[in-house]
Image (cartoon, rainbow, N blue to C red):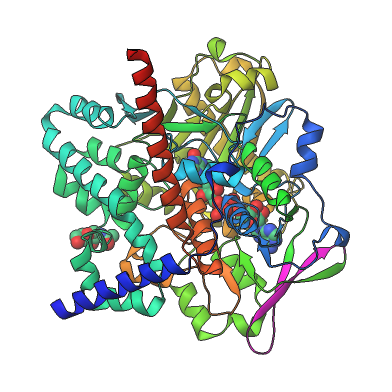
Amino acid sequence: MWLLIIWVSVLIWAAGTFWFLFKKPSPFSASSVRPAEPLELDQKKRDKVLKQGFTKEKIPANLDAIIIGSGIGGMTAAATMAKSGKKVLVLEQHDVAGGCCHTFTEKGFEFDVGLHYFGQLHENGLLKVAMDQISEGQLEFVELPQHFDSIVIDDKGKRRDYPILSGRVEMEQNLKKLFPNDVKAVEEFFKVMKLTARKTPLMAILKIIPQWFALFLIKSGIANLISSIFRLSDFNATEMNYKLTSNKDLHLIFSYFFYGVAPKESSFMINALMLHHFKRGAYYPKGGASEIPFHVTKVIQKYGGSVLVRAPVSRILVDNKGTAYGVTVKKGEEHVEIRAPVIISNCGIFNTFQKLLPTEIQTKPEIQSRLDMMRPGKASFLLFSGFDATQEELGITATSTWLFKSNDMDGMMDDFFSMSKDEAPENVPMVLITFPSAKDSQTSQIRHPGKSCMTILTMVNYEWFEDWKDTRVRKRGDDYFSYKQRFADHIFNWACQHFPKLKDKLVYQEAATPLTNMHYLSCNRGAIYSADHNLERFYAEAMARNRCDTPVKNLYLSGQDIFSCGIAGALHGGLLCASTVLNYPVYIDLYLLKKNLKWRKAKETAKLAEKKQQ
Ligand SMILES: Cc1cc2nc3c(=O)[nH]c(=O)nc-3n(C[C@H](O)[C@H](O)[C@H](O)COP(=O)(O)OP(=O)(O)OC[C@H]3O[C@@H](n4cnc5c(N)ncnc54)[C@H](O)[C@@H]3O)c2cc1C
Ligand SMILES: *[C@@H]1O[C@H](CO)[C@@H](O)[C@H](O)[C@H]1NC(C)=O
């Protein structure tokens, strides 16, 4: 056994030396970041960047890579490759770039589609450094109040309110104060959470080292000797929660970020990572979510690439040797062929393998075994509401509210998802209520004065809406409308119990069902987080097998199906993909850059202190 460890160490050392000697020029640099320019408020100028319609003339010559889908994952892969000197083309089926980061404006209300807030954006954190690199410093983030989430358990007449605070120390302290009888459980949870967060990079490394080597490390048991994370990822959340405490309110808090999988079937590691994600604060992009595609598109263009919308990819072209060499884009009745030596798909594993690959490739056992590792996730129901009133008049804030009908997540989810189509609408057991306009109130009042908006999110079964799958958007019929209105009324009234001033000021409302997601985001079965985040997906071996390279040569996957959903998760999917395609771990550059920036900052602070003393 020791011999093996020595052997592995030598290998790592040799790889390190090789990397040092033959290092490729870095796509990332401190000098490419410049101070953020003022917000672009002219919608026409914004549309010129975000809505460049596809035409044959706009396809750049000598492409190095085509990226299917303009979500944060695809944009990150594209920008990283563009900054490494590659000529890239991003193709987006919708009429605006951004995927889950796009926004839409209706009657003067601007709604985010898939970004409520995200974390780990503190100065010189890895994610912040990556965001700065792909936008060249143009993205700014508003830090939400320390009390960023409220959890409300609305148990018949016995309502409990739990504020969730961010803060390195405060997050844990707050929970200890709320649960004085469970101080030990909270401490233990935070200990494991910290370990999980620190060791997650090891999980990601499994995806970029050669697969045979990753599998060897896991199967030989060496991985377990290196870190306990590879075993930790096998625990389901309920099992771990019960190990810590019998307090069911606390169980719910340890797993409150619902994403369609009951805690008993989800990975404790993932649930802990979600809470950890907000330990250093919750953030929202200044100017709204569309700032992300707006600035990253400009970076891609600067390096000779292009982001084109209304460009639905209808086929990935594969030659008779099984190598991908291009795509076709549907334009009217025509299918325009575009060739490139690298094809990156950011539209999910199911869309990619089951819809875009030629049928004879889809049925290959290697493709089937990749598909068998994943299953489609749950769909979502979203309710967008607009109010003609300020946040003060409405009594709303930037804090998001998570409402639950009881503290039994496993039970609630089992019951709800096994309901019939007719029972479901009035029995939604959990919702997330957020107020985008209040999160960035400063620029929101400039952009949309006197208006406020709210988004309510919950998870639903695709099957409840499946009957209408062949109808056209906005023409799905009265029965569809009245069915979705039942969900809408129920969750809106529930929200109004907590925010009573909303009801009288409502002037706009639109509900988005799984079919809406399929139309605007091309989500497979309306699953916003794409593949299900079930426990088995996070077993070490599955992590090693589910990677960016695919059984089809020159075809790569990016985005949320690679590691996990979330803006951060999908962005890492993009970085892992760029690392695989460039055959070079861009993480090393990011890490060195981060260290360098921290060191500079420390030096500056020291200098400043010295000056003050003089
Ligand atoms: C309602 C909602 C709320 C969310 N809230 C948060 C949050 O608060 N914090 C957080 O971190 N994350 C949140 N998320 C999750 C996060 O937004 C996603 O996990 C992440 O943005 C996914 O990025 P992606 O690049 O993998 O995919 P996507 O953003 O889904 O991009 C895929 C793109 O591919 C395009 N496409 C598909 N098929 C084709 C084709 N054939 N041709 C061309 N283009 C195609 C789609 O139109 C889409 O633009 C939320 C998501 C939703 C939907
Ligand atoms: C969760 O883990 C426990 C303990 O290993 C196990 O008994 C239970 O069946 C698991 N739950 C699921 C849904 O797999």
- Note whether 483 is above or below 94 in the view shown: above
Q: Is residue 454 left or right of residue 177?
A: right
**Quadrant where the C terminus is found in the figure:** top left
Task: Identify the residue shown where x is 50% and y is 18%.
Answer: 396
Q: Quadrant of residue 177?
A: top left
Residue interval drawn in magenta:
314-332
Q: Is residue 184 magenta?
A: no
Residue 146 in view: no
| Magenta-drawn stretch, dominant element (helix, strand or loop) | strand
**Quadrant where the N terminus is found in the figure:** bottom left
Q: Is residue 63 left or right of residue 187?
A: right
- Note whether 124 is above or below 305 in the view shown: above
Question: Which sits in the foreground, 366 or 8?
Answer: 8
Q: Is residue 177 left or right of residue 557?
A: left
- Note whether 91 is above or below 224 in the view shown: above
Q: Quadrant of residue 253?
A: top left
Q: Is residue 316 magenta?
A: yes
Q: Is residue 489 left or right of residue 49?
A: left
